[in-house]
Amino acid sequence: MLQPEFEQFEPEKSVNNVRPFGLRDKIGYLFGDFGNDFFFLLASSYLMVFYTDIFHISAATVGVLFMIARFWDAFADVLWGRFIDTRKTTKHGKFKPWMFRMSFPLVFTGVLMFVKIPGMSEGFYLAWAFVTYILWGTLYSTVNIPYGSMASVITSDPVERTSLSTWRGLGATLAGLIINVGGPLLLFQNNQASESRFLITAIIFGILSLSCYMASVALTTERITPPEHPTEKGNFKKTLKGLTKNKPLLWILITSLVFMVTVLLIGTVNVYLFKDYFGSTTALSVIGFVQTAAVLVAMPIINPLVKRFGKKAVGSTGMLLAAAAYLLLYILPNVNVTTFIFLSGVGMFASYGLFNLIIWAFVTDVIDYHEFLTGLREDGTVYSIYSFARKIGQAVAGGIGGFAIAAIGYDATKAVQTKEALDGMYFLATLVPGILFALAFVMLAFLYPLNKARTNQLVADLDERRKQNAE
């Protein structure tokens, strides 16, 4: 048995007379990330080019904005997660009411990011970008933290939680299909960013996003009522002590940070790479479709793989294959657009399919481990700590992406970029991701401690303690 320090524990109470976990919950949870990613992916993939090419803000300044906003969001996540954990459970659940309330201002602010008021000064556009983007990111925390935390109260079964993670991944994939495939066709005209098209697309996505949030709230059921803990200093000290001792949390945080930096950097650079290096935003739509197809291919096999080998083995294998694909792209001479799309597809299958589809199941495991260490069930707090790491990754990626695009010599006023700038784009799109994916593999394979056997033991130990305390 696992033997951490263990203090007083109150068992969870199950909600009586509710329908059993099933397909409705999975579809409802899918809709949550479907709604999230309409704006998250739109912003992470295309907001920088909107700022550089339409607001005419320098790429380095955009990088500063992204870094500041994401660092603030990281702390906002923790504050909001702690706030949620101190709220009492209502008849509609603990997390769903906050998703419902905060989704309306979130979507409205998301549309405002893509509004350009004509005739204003450069300083006004810069201020508009800072205010709307930071406000949107803060409101995103108020919806995403309760949404992510909700998985652990929908079901306590590890297999069902893995299923929720997979369906959540499918929701993100469907949003990615629309945005990554349709985005270049909707947002660009003759390979140039279109101001009116960006705004119309944002409005349409806003309506779709809000509809998805409402569907998620309506279809999911919170079955587990966490015990109410008094908000006293002693409990908070116990929480902090548990977090510092939670090695699985530590290493999944760092691995996720590296993963987020990598995939967001790829998304940012690919827009410029296909627009300027390959000269085809249509091919950008193709790679968006390949990314979606890669995840859809992985979905039917991910649960059998996890069941046989465990999440750690499957996820680390994905990171290794992704590293190999991107390093090969860098090494091969004279790579054309077809070869680039094919090998990128392999990397996407490995990273998005074999790792990202199960990342949320990793998170529920570390939440369980926190409960085992402390006796406290603090889904919102632990999830917000994980989200903190992702936001730090977004901050680093946003800053690096902007600084790197500026450093290689990209000039939005030029119809044709210099050879140095084009070569720099290819370097950023291949070698850098390859190295980062390799780093993520090392951490997950050799430093993350919860392999299949230890995870199963954790579940058994928690069940035994709950039975003992229920007697």
Image (cartoon, rainbow, N blue to C red):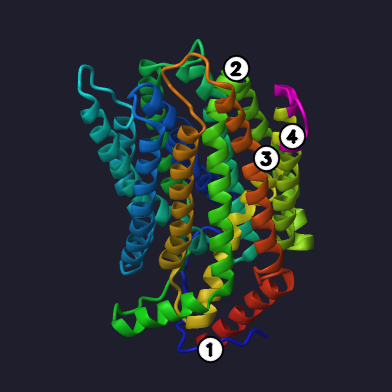
Which sits in the foreground, 291 or 203? Answer: 291
- For marks 3 and 4, the one nearer the N-term is 4
The quarter holding residue 342 reads: top right
Depth-wise, is mark 3 or mark 4 nearer the camera?
4
Badge 4 element: helix
Mark 3, secondary structure of its residue: helix
Residue 447: percent from the left, percent from the top? 66, 69
**Which stretch did the figure color magenta?**
329-339
Is 183 on the left or on the right of 109, as rendered?
right
Q: Residue 379's spot in the image, x, y percent?
A: 45, 67
Q: Name the amino acid, label 1.
A: Glu
Pair 1/2: label in front:
2
Q: Which residue is mark 1?
A: 5
For mark 2, give the secondary structure. loop
Question: Residue tagged by mark 4?
Answer: 343
> Which mark is on residue 122?
none
Callout 3 amino acid = Met
